[in-house]
Image: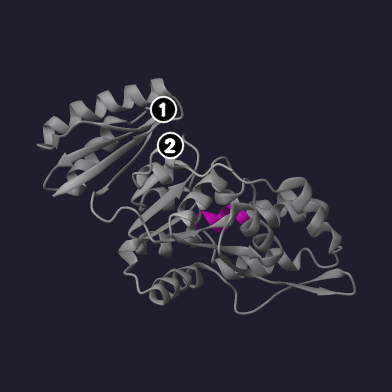
Amino acid sequence: MQLALTVVGPERDALAFGQSRILAALKDVRARVKEPRPLGEAAVDLILDAADLSEVRAAALQAIDGAPVDIAVQPLEGRRKRLFVADMDSTIIGCECLDELADYAGKKAEIAAITERAMRGELEFEGALRERVAMLKGLSVSALQSAYDERVQLNPGARTLVRTMAQNGTRCLLVSGGFTFFTSRVAEAAGFHAQRANTLGEGEGALTGLVGEPILGREAKLAALTEEAAALGLELSAAMAVGDGANDLAMIKAAGLGVAYRAKPIVAAEADAKVDFADLTALLYFQGYRAEEFVTD
C-alpha cells in the first residue's frame, strides 16, 4: 500500500526537526520512504510503501511527541476530497459566538463555562444550548451585529482553505451548533457554498431565550455530511470534516479524513489527524496541494 505521510510545521526549522525524527522512526516499522516531495516552505509529503497505516501513524506520532509539527497519514490514492464539511466556532473562526453574545448580556463567564463543558463532551449538547440561550432572554438583537462586527474573525488560513478547495471542484459546507445569523456571514466571507445552523428566537427587538427546534447538534452534523455526500453521489471516504468539539466527533469519525483543529482531548484522541500548530492551510497540504496552488485572493 502506498501511503502519504504529510508533515506541516508553523515554520521551516520545526518542519526539518519533525521530518528528521519521523524518518528515523519509520525504519523501525519497515516503511520504505520515497523521495520527499516539498509542498511549501514548511510542508512536505513523505510517500511510503508500507503495509500497515496504523503502525506508521503510531510510529510517526511517537516520533514527533513534543515537536511543534502536525502530521497526517493516509492512503495516497483518493486523498483529494470532493466534499468538505467544517465546524464554525473555534474552527473556521477564532471564537464561540454564543460566548461573545453572552458578554453583551454581562454573562460571559457563566455561559462560557457551560460551553467548555459541552465541547468537552461532559454535557449533552442540546440541553446545554437551550440552557445558555435561555440566559440571553431580553438581549437586544442589535447585539448580534455588534458581536459579529467586533468579535468574529476568520482563523488564519480559513479563506485560503475553503476557496482553494471550492475552485478545485469540492463542495464546501459550513455546519454549526451556533446560529444562522453568524454562519450566513462567515460562510460568505470564507467562500463556503452552503451553511446549516440553529436559529435564535426573536420578538420585539429582543431575544426570546428560545432556540429553534430541532436543534442542530452532533447527530445533525453527521446527517449533514451523509446527506451532502449522497446528493453528490460520493462515498464518505471522499469527504473531509474538521472541528474542535465533542459535537463534531461523529462527522469527524465518519469522514474519509477527519481532522481535529485545536481540539478538545476527546476529539483529538479519535480524529485521523490533528492540527495544533499550523494554520488551516495544513488541511490543503494534507491533501497534497502545493503552496503555489493555493487561492489567496
The amino acid type, in three-letter code, at marker 1 is Glu
Q: Which residue: 78% across, 63% down?
A: 136
Tell me residue 130's x, y (percent): 67, 70
Per the image, the residue denoted by label 2 is 291
Picture quadrant of residue 225: bottom left
Q: Quadrant of the C terminus?
A: top right
For residue 74, above or below residue 253: above
Magenta stretch, main secondary structure, is helix
Magenta residues span: 115-121
Tell me residue 192's x, y (percent): 56, 59
| Mark 2–mark 1 CB contact (< 8 Å) | yes
For residue 1, above or below residue 277: below
Question: Counting other residues with Cα less than 10 Å from the Cα at mark 1, is it few (<14), some (14-19), or many (20 or more)?
Answer: some
Per the image, the residue denoted by label 1 is 41
Q: Which residue: 41% across, 27% down?
A: 41
Residue 106 seen in the figure: no
Tell me residue 151's x, y (percent): 73, 46
Does residue 284 belong to the magenta stretch? Answer: no
